[in-house]
Amino acid sequence: MFIPIGDDNSKRHLKPLVVWLIFAANVYVWYLQFSVGETFTYGFSAVPYELMHATDLVGQQVVIIEGKRQVLHQAPGPSPIYLTLLSSMFMHGSWMHIIGNMAYLLIFADQIEDLLGHVKFLFFYLLCGLAASVAHVAADPNSTIPCLGASGAIAGVLGAYLLMYPRNHVHLLVFHRVMLVPSYIVLGGWIFLQLLSQVSVKSGGSGVAYMAHIGGFAAGAILILLFKHRERRLGHLV
């Protein structure tokens, strides 16, 4: 068992206000999922087929997930259906799903917000989430399996963190012992596992959107360089 439980924040200057705002939004939407029920979850999740065909699937859909036949009860979504690209970014499928995602958000995202500033970080986070969804849809455009979760956007944060703070120490829980491990090992290992898992996914799909993780991670690595480059360029003009 290898679980990140913190990192070195000694050089952080800004309070992570946007990170906490995103955290609160995820918790609130999780509450809505419980309150409204499956109609909300199915209606506002991102479904590749809906996005590619600009249509809103309603009713029973038979899908194959990890080799098993499952019946999903699709519900009406927003109009236009492309809004699910945003709404799905704040939704989750289980307690473990949201707890794991929020832990990674709180551990790693504050450093990126500190680097970019509040407003830029919000745009960065949303763009990473959108890029993750695009990657997922492109990998299987006719899939009718709903996709939801903050992990694509958070993967973008991890990609940026790996480039900007490769030697920053991460507090890693290894079985019953806490170790200080450079982030390039922790996050490099994480993206390697996503790539390996995507390659080994069996036909019929997987319960985890590995391509969303990979797409978000790549987007974060690219966007952090673009954002920082523009910041330096503007700095020369002042």
Image (spheres, rainbow, N blue to C red):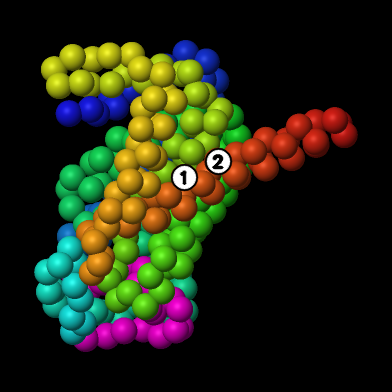
Q: Secondary structure at mark 1?
A: helix
Question: Would you identify the image quadrant in which residue 38 lies?
Answer: bottom left
Coordinates of residue 63 in the picture (x, y in percent): 20, 76
Does 183 sit above or below residue 83?
above
Quadrant position of the C terminus in the picture: top right
Question: Could you tell me the amino acid type at mark 2?
Answer: Ala
In this image, 117 relative to 211: left or right?
right
Q: Are marks 1 and 2 in contact (CB under 8 Å)?
A: yes
For marks 1 and 2, give the CA distance: 6 Å
Farthest residue to the right: give it.
Answer: 237
Question: Would you identify the image quadrant in which residue 31 lies?
Answer: bottom left
Where is mark 2, residue-wise? Answer: 221
Quadrant position of the N terminus in the picture: top left
Report whether residue 112 is seen. Answer: no
Question: Which residue appears at 21% of the width and 86% of the height?
Answer: 59
Question: Could you tell me the amino acid type at mark 1?
Answer: Phe
Coordinates of residue 217 in the picture (x, y in percent): 47, 45
Does 31 sit above or below residue 224?
below
The magenta-colored residue range is 38-59
How many numbered discs sit on the rendered protein?
A: 2
The residue lying toward the viewer, choosing from 226 and 79, is 226
The residue lying toward the viewer, choosing from 161 and 142, is 142
The residue lying toward the viewer, choosing from 4 and 58, is 4
Circle number at residue 217:
1
Does 209 sit above or below residue 111?
below
